[in-house]
Amino acid sequence: MTSFPDRAPPPDSAPHLAPADVTDAQRALRDAGGASLSTHDGVTVGGWEVRTSRTPILGKEALAGLEARLGTSHLPEMVYGSALTLTHAESNTKLHFNAEDALREWLVENAPPLKIAAAARWAEAHRLRFGTGAPPNTNSGSSGSAPPPGWDETQPISDYDWTFTTPYRGSVMRGGEAAGEEASSSEDCSNRKTNTQKKSWMSTQKRVDRGALMAREPILFFDELTLYESELDDNGESSVTIKVRVMPTCWFVLMRFWMRCDGVRVRLRETRFFLQNRQK
Protein backbone atom coordinates (compact mmCIF):
# COMPACT_ATOMS: atom_id res chain seq x y z
CA MET A 1 0.00 0.00 0.00
CA THR A 2 2.82 2.35 0.84
CA SER A 3 6.56 2.51 1.20
CA PHE A 4 8.67 3.47 4.15
CA PRO A 5 12.15 4.90 4.55
CA ASP A 6 15.00 2.96 6.03
CA ARG A 7 15.31 2.74 9.81
CA ALA A 8 17.99 5.44 9.75
CA PRO A 9 17.97 8.60 7.62
CA PRO A 10 19.84 8.34 4.32
CA PRO A 11 23.49 9.38 4.48
CA ASP A 12 24.26 13.06 4.27
CA SER A 13 25.90 12.51 0.91
CA ALA A 14 22.57 11.55 -0.65
CA PRO A 15 21.75 14.16 -3.33
CA HIS A 16 18.69 16.32 -2.72
CA LEU A 17 18.53 17.60 -6.29
CA ALA A 18 16.75 15.19 -8.55
CA PRO A 19 18.37 15.79 -11.99
CA ALA A 20 21.30 13.49 -12.61
CA ASP A 21 23.49 16.35 -13.74
CA VAL A 22 23.99 18.73 -10.82
CA THR A 23 24.99 21.48 -13.23
CA ASP A 24 21.63 21.16 -15.00
CA ALA A 25 19.86 21.30 -11.63
CA GLN A 26 21.69 24.44 -10.64
CA ARG A 27 20.90 25.99 -13.99
CA ALA A 28 17.20 25.15 -13.60
CA LEU A 29 17.20 26.66 -10.12
CA ARG A 30 18.87 29.82 -11.40
CA ASP A 31 16.43 30.08 -14.29
CA ALA A 32 13.56 29.89 -11.78
CA GLY A 33 15.00 32.84 -9.89
CA GLY A 34 16.07 30.69 -6.96
CA ALA A 35 19.29 29.68 -5.26
CA SER A 36 20.68 26.91 -3.11
CA LEU A 37 21.15 27.63 0.58
CA SER A 38 24.76 28.06 1.65
CA THR A 39 24.28 25.17 4.07
CA HIS A 40 23.27 22.89 1.15
CA ASP A 41 20.12 21.73 2.99
CA GLY A 42 17.51 23.58 0.96
CA VAL A 43 16.64 26.19 -1.64
CA THR A 44 14.98 29.57 -2.00
CA VAL A 45 12.55 30.08 -4.85
CA GLY A 46 9.39 32.13 -5.42
CA GLY A 47 9.87 33.99 -2.14
CA TRP A 48 9.98 30.77 -0.11
CA GLU A 49 12.89 29.25 1.73
CA VAL A 50 12.61 25.46 1.93
CA ARG A 51 14.98 23.80 4.37
CA THR A 52 15.31 20.31 5.85
CA SER A 53 17.41 19.13 8.77
CA ARG A 54 18.34 15.55 9.55
CA THR A 55 19.38 13.84 12.75
CA PRO A 56 19.91 10.24 13.83
CA ILE A 57 17.53 8.67 16.35
CA LEU A 58 17.49 10.84 19.46
CA GLY A 59 19.86 9.72 22.20
CA LYS A 60 19.15 9.18 25.87
CA GLU A 61 19.61 12.80 26.97
CA ALA A 62 17.55 14.22 24.11
CA LEU A 63 14.77 11.73 24.81
CA ALA A 64 14.79 12.63 28.50
CA GLY A 65 14.35 16.29 27.59
CA LEU A 66 11.53 15.45 25.19
CA GLU A 67 9.78 13.37 27.86
CA ALA A 68 10.05 16.26 30.30
CA ARG A 69 8.59 18.76 27.85
CA LEU A 70 5.74 16.47 26.85
CA GLY A 71 5.08 15.17 30.34
CA THR A 72 5.09 11.49 29.39
CA SER A 73 7.53 8.60 29.38
CA HIS A 74 5.61 6.78 26.64
CA LEU A 75 7.37 7.53 23.36
CA PRO A 76 7.95 5.62 20.11
CA GLU A 77 11.11 3.53 19.97
CA MET A 78 12.57 5.74 17.25
CA VAL A 79 12.17 9.51 17.48
CA TYR A 80 14.17 11.77 15.18
CA GLY A 81 15.07 15.43 15.49
CA SER A 82 14.65 15.86 11.75
CA ALA A 83 12.49 18.76 10.60
CA LEU A 84 11.15 20.53 7.52
CA THR A 85 10.74 24.31 7.51
CA LEU A 86 9.17 26.47 4.80
CA THR A 87 9.46 30.21 5.37
CA HIS A 88 7.82 33.05 3.43
CA ALA A 89 9.41 36.32 4.56
CA GLU A 90 6.98 38.66 2.78
CA SER A 91 3.91 37.32 4.62
CA ASN A 92 5.86 36.45 7.78
CA THR A 93 4.62 32.86 7.49
CA LYS A 94 6.43 29.70 8.52
CA LEU A 95 5.40 26.07 8.14
CA HIS A 96 7.29 23.71 10.41
CA PHE A 97 7.10 19.91 10.70
CA ASN A 98 8.73 18.15 13.66
CA ALA A 99 8.30 15.12 15.91
CA GLU A 100 7.76 17.02 19.16
CA ASP A 101 4.68 18.86 17.90
CA ALA A 102 3.35 15.66 16.32
CA LEU A 103 3.66 13.79 19.63
CA ARG A 104 2.14 16.70 21.55
CA GLU A 105 -0.98 16.48 19.39
CA TRP A 106 -1.02 12.70 19.90
CA LEU A 107 -1.24 13.36 23.63
CA VAL A 108 -3.98 15.96 23.20
CA GLU A 109 -6.12 13.67 21.04
CA ASN A 110 -5.82 10.89 23.64
CA ALA A 111 -7.43 8.25 21.43
CA PRO A 112 -8.65 5.07 23.16
CA PRO A 113 -6.02 2.30 23.12
CA LEU A 114 -6.37 -0.60 20.71
CA LYS A 115 -6.44 -4.19 21.88
CA ILE A 116 -4.15 -6.41 19.91
CA ALA A 117 -5.46 -9.51 18.14
CA ALA A 118 -3.99 -11.76 20.85
CA ALA A 119 -6.00 -9.88 23.48
CA ALA A 120 -9.18 -10.34 21.47
CA ARG A 121 -8.55 -14.07 21.18
CA TRP A 122 -7.82 -14.26 24.91
CA ALA A 123 -11.07 -12.43 25.72
CA GLU A 124 -13.11 -14.75 23.50
CA ALA A 125 -11.49 -17.86 24.98
CA HIS A 126 -12.17 -16.51 28.48
CA ARG A 127 -15.82 -15.84 27.62
CA LEU A 128 -16.30 -19.36 26.30
CA ARG A 129 -14.66 -20.95 29.35
CA PHE A 130 -15.72 -18.74 32.24
CA GLY A 131 -18.62 -16.67 30.92
CA THR A 132 -18.82 -12.88 31.13
CA GLY A 133 -18.87 -12.55 34.94
CA ALA A 134 -16.20 -11.10 37.17
CA PRO A 135 -13.13 -13.12 38.19
CA PRO A 136 -13.73 -15.69 40.95
CA ASN A 137 -13.42 -14.37 44.50
CA THR A 138 -10.03 -15.36 45.93
CA ASN A 139 -10.41 -13.74 49.36
CA SER A 140 -12.75 -16.26 51.08
CA GLY A 141 -9.89 -18.59 51.96
CA SER A 142 -11.71 -21.75 50.84
CA SER A 143 -9.95 -23.99 48.41
CA GLY A 144 -13.05 -24.16 46.24
CA SER A 145 -12.94 -20.43 45.50
CA ALA A 146 -9.47 -20.42 43.95
CA PRO A 147 -9.39 -19.15 40.36
CA PRO A 148 -9.84 -21.98 37.87
CA PRO A 149 -6.84 -22.97 35.77
CA GLY A 150 -6.46 -20.68 32.79
CA TRP A 151 -7.67 -17.50 34.49
CA ASP A 152 -5.19 -14.82 33.52
CA GLU A 153 -5.06 -11.98 36.04
CA THR A 154 -2.01 -10.39 34.40
CA GLN A 155 -3.58 -9.47 31.04
CA PRO A 156 -2.00 -6.06 30.36
CA ILE A 157 -4.26 -3.08 29.79
CA SER A 158 -2.72 0.06 28.29
CA ASP A 159 -4.12 3.36 29.47
CA TYR A 160 -2.78 5.35 26.52
CA ASP A 161 -2.83 5.17 22.73
CA TRP A 162 0.24 3.03 22.15
CA THR A 163 -0.15 3.32 18.35
CA PHE A 164 0.91 7.00 18.58
CA THR A 165 -1.89 8.05 16.23
CA THR A 166 -1.62 11.81 15.77
CA PRO A 167 -3.88 14.37 14.04
CA TYR A 168 -0.81 16.54 13.43
CA ARG A 169 -0.89 18.51 10.19
CA GLY A 170 2.15 20.66 10.62
CA SER A 171 2.88 23.72 12.72
CA VAL A 172 1.85 26.99 11.07
CA MET A 173 3.42 30.17 12.41
CA ARG A 174 2.46 33.74 11.52
CA GLY A 175 4.36 36.62 13.00
CA GLY A 176 6.17 34.27 15.37
CA GLU A 177 2.96 32.85 16.87
CA ALA A 178 1.14 29.62 16.15
CA ALA A 179 -1.82 30.05 13.83
CA GLY A 180 -4.81 27.93 14.82
CA GLU A 181 -7.22 26.78 12.16
CA GLU A 182 -10.17 28.08 14.15
CA ALA A 183 -8.99 31.71 13.85
CA SER A 184 -11.14 33.62 11.37
CA SER A 185 -9.47 35.52 8.58
CA SER A 186 -11.29 38.77 9.45
CA GLU A 187 -10.11 38.67 13.06
CA ASP A 188 -6.62 37.89 11.93
CA CYS A 189 -6.54 40.81 9.52
CA SER A 190 -7.87 43.25 12.13
CA ASN A 191 -5.15 42.23 14.56
CA ARG A 192 -2.37 42.45 12.00
CA LYS A 193 -2.85 45.88 10.39
CA THR A 194 0.66 47.16 9.87
CA ASN A 195 2.45 49.26 7.30
CA THR A 196 2.77 46.13 5.19
CA GLN A 197 -0.48 44.22 4.69
CA LYS A 198 0.06 40.61 5.78
CA LYS A 199 -1.71 37.67 4.18
CA SER A 200 -3.76 35.29 6.29
CA TRP A 201 -4.98 31.71 6.00
CA MET A 202 -8.50 31.23 4.67
CA SER A 203 -10.70 28.20 4.06
CA THR A 204 -10.94 27.21 0.42
CA GLN A 205 -12.60 24.68 -1.84
CA LYS A 206 -9.60 24.59 -4.15
CA ARG A 207 -7.81 21.30 -4.65
CA VAL A 208 -4.23 20.39 -5.34
CA ASP A 209 -3.42 21.00 -9.00
CA ARG A 210 -2.46 17.50 -10.08
CA GLY A 211 -1.62 18.78 -13.54
CA ALA A 212 1.04 21.07 -12.08
CA LEU A 213 2.51 18.20 -10.08
CA MET A 214 2.60 15.94 -13.13
CA ALA A 215 4.15 18.56 -15.39
CA ARG A 216 7.57 17.70 -16.77
CA GLU A 217 9.44 20.31 -14.80
CA PRO A 218 12.88 19.97 -13.25
CA ILE A 219 12.80 19.08 -9.56
CA LEU A 220 14.83 21.76 -7.84
CA PHE A 221 14.78 20.09 -4.42
CA PHE A 222 13.46 16.86 -2.94
CA ASP A 223 13.79 15.23 0.45
CA GLU A 224 12.04 12.66 2.63
CA LEU A 225 12.15 12.68 6.43
CA THR A 226 10.95 10.41 9.20
CA LEU A 227 9.73 12.15 12.37
CA TYR A 228 9.10 9.03 14.44
CA GLU A 229 8.31 5.36 14.06
CA SER A 230 7.43 2.42 16.27
CA GLU A 231 7.16 -1.34 15.84
CA LEU A 232 4.29 -1.38 18.36
CA ASP A 233 5.95 -4.02 20.51
CA ASP A 234 6.18 -6.36 17.50
CA ASN A 235 2.46 -6.00 16.82
CA GLY A 236 2.82 -3.92 13.65
CA GLU A 237 4.22 -0.50 12.88
CA SER A 238 3.40 3.19 12.90
CA SER A 239 5.29 6.15 11.49
CA VAL A 240 5.09 9.79 10.53
CA THR A 241 6.96 10.71 7.36
CA ILE A 242 7.27 13.85 5.24
CA LYS A 243 8.11 14.33 1.58
CA VAL A 244 8.84 17.71 0.04
CA ARG A 245 9.30 18.55 -3.63
CA VAL A 246 10.13 21.94 -5.09
CA MET A 247 9.72 22.78 -8.78
CA PRO A 248 10.04 26.10 -10.65
CA THR A 249 6.28 26.79 -10.56
CA CYS A 250 5.19 25.13 -7.30
CA TRP A 251 6.12 23.20 -4.19
CA PHE A 252 4.38 20.25 -2.60
CA VAL A 253 4.55 18.66 0.87
CA LEU A 254 3.03 15.30 1.74
CA MET A 255 2.88 14.35 5.42
CA ARG A 256 1.72 10.82 6.17
CA PHE A 257 0.81 9.00 9.35
CA TRP A 258 0.66 5.25 8.75
CA MET A 259 -0.26 2.58 11.28
CA ARG A 260 -0.73 -1.17 10.97
CA CYS A 261 -1.74 -3.20 14.01
CA ASP A 262 -1.53 -6.83 12.93
CA GLY A 263 -4.90 -8.53 12.73
CA VAL A 264 -6.72 -5.48 14.10
CA ARG A 265 -6.63 -2.25 12.10
CA VAL A 266 -4.78 -0.02 9.67
CA ARG A 267 -4.84 3.78 9.69
CA LEU A 268 -3.71 6.27 7.09
CA ARG A 269 -3.83 10.03 7.60
CA GLU A 270 -2.36 12.27 4.93
CA THR A 271 -1.99 16.04 4.77
CA ARG A 272 -0.97 17.85 1.60
CA PHE A 273 0.39 21.36 1.27
CA PHE A 274 0.57 22.80 -2.22
CA LEU A 275 1.57 26.26 -3.40
CA GLN A 276 1.70 27.46 -6.97
CA ASN A 277 4.23 30.18 -7.62
CA ARG A 278 2.59 32.77 -9.87
CA GLN A 279 5.40 35.27 -9.75
CA LYS A 280 6.65 36.39 -13.12
Image (spheres, helix red, strand yellow):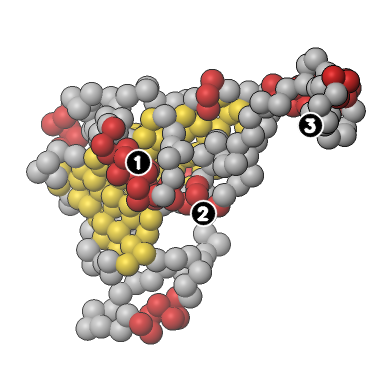
Instruction: Classify residue 104 as left or right of residue 259.
Output: left
Tell me where residue 253 sits by quadrant: top left
Question: Which is nearer the eye, 192 or 202?
Answer: 192
Instruction: Classify residue 241 as left or right of residue 236.
Output: left
Q: Amino acid at mark 3?
A: Asn
Instruction: In the rendered view, tell whether residue 204 sits above or below residue 261.
Output: below
The picture places residue 59, in percent across and down from the top left corner, at: 27, 31
Badge 1 or badge 3: first in the primary sequence: 3
Q: Amino acid at mark 2?
A: Val
The picture places residue 181, in percent across and down from the top left corner, at: 48, 65
Residue beneath disc 3? 139
Which numbered disc, 2 or 3, marks the residue closer to the eye?
3
Residue at the location (55% across, 52% down)? 109
Instruction: In the rendered view, tell whether residue 189 sits above or below residue 126.
Output: below
Q: How many marks?
A: 3
Where is the N terminus found, in terms of image quarters?
top right
- Residue 274 visible: no
Tell me where residue 236 sits by quadrant: top right
Residue beneath disc 1? 244
Question: Which is nearer the eye, 240 or 89?
Answer: 240
- Whole-Å distance between the Cαs marked 1 and 2? 27 Å
- Whole-Å distance between the Cαs marked 1 and 3? 62 Å
Badge 2 or badge 3: first in the primary sequence: 2
Tell me where residue 39 sits by quadrant: top left
Q: Which label is found at residue 23?
A: none
Helix, strand or loop at mark 3: loop
Helix, strand or loop at mark 2: helix
Residue beneath disc 2? 108
Residue at the location (27% across, 66% down)? 176
Which numbered disc, 1 or 2, marks the residue closer to the eye?
2
